[in-house]
Amino acid sequence: NAYGRGANFSFKLASKASTFDIERIKLKDYPWFFVDMSSAGREVTVRWSSNFQFVGFDHMGHSVVIDADRPNGEGTGMRPMALLLAALGGCTGMDIVQGLKKFGQSLKGLEVKVSGEVNEKLPHYYTKIRVHYLVKGESIDKAVLERVIKESDELFCSVGATIKGRAEILTSYEIVEV
């Protein structure tokens, strides 16, 4: 990824004493500038790169490119609403992997397909989100999988809990024997 660690960006740094321009700083050379360990997982920085393209960084320096489709953007990254669905899929996916391992299931693969329906009027927020788990493994116990999905939905998935105030989240699954 051209926008990961070591990427070059131009930006302004503001301090109480002065404001000055710093051009073409390399992230790998100045990790202390981008990293706020006190906000681990609770804060990200999203920096405008060009046109409609932004790059988001977390406290560890991981990055994600966010962009609009042409003609407004260049189509070089995920759109913000797709990123929200991906965050939900990743969050609940981690819960599923951890839960199935906890219960001794022989998980070989997991794919989480997330789709959403949006409100027709502005703002276009998700009103309904469907999460479908494609679980691959050897003799996956259906009851265990259902329990793990329910626990993720009701207890563990922070992204889902955040979204639920506005959108209905529906889950389904498929087990593939491998």
Image (cartoon, rainbow, N blue to C red):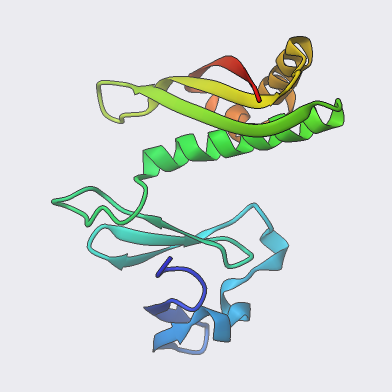
Q: Residue furthest front?
A: 178
Most foreground residue, 164 or 96: 96
100 relative position to 39: left or right: right
66 relative position to 156: left or right: left
Q: Position of residue 58 (x, y in %)?
A: 57, 60
Q: Position of residue 27 (x, y in %)?
A: 52, 79
Counting every numbered tag in the picture gives: 0
Q: Is residue 158 visible?
A: no
Q: Measuring 38% from the left and 78% from the top, which residue is drawn there?
A: 9
Q: Measuring 45% from the left and 85% from the top, which residue is drawn there?
A: 25
Residue 69, above or below 102 = below
Q: Measuring 77% from the left and 35% from the top, which residue is drawn there?
A: 98
Most foreground residue, 138 or 167: 138
Q: Is residue 16 visible?
A: yes
Q: Measuring 36% from the left and 60% from the top, which residue is drawn there?
A: 54
32 relative position to 53: left or right: right
- Please state, as top left, top right, bottom left or bottom right, where the C terminus lies in the image: top right
Asked which quadrant contains residue 164, the reply is: top right
Q: Position of residue 37 (x, y in %)?
A: 70, 66
- Please state, as top left, top right, bottom left or bottom right, where the N terminus lies in the image: bottom left
Asked which quadrant contains residue 82, the reply is: top left
Q: Position of residue 4 (x, y in %)?
A: 48, 69
26 relative position to 62: left or right: left
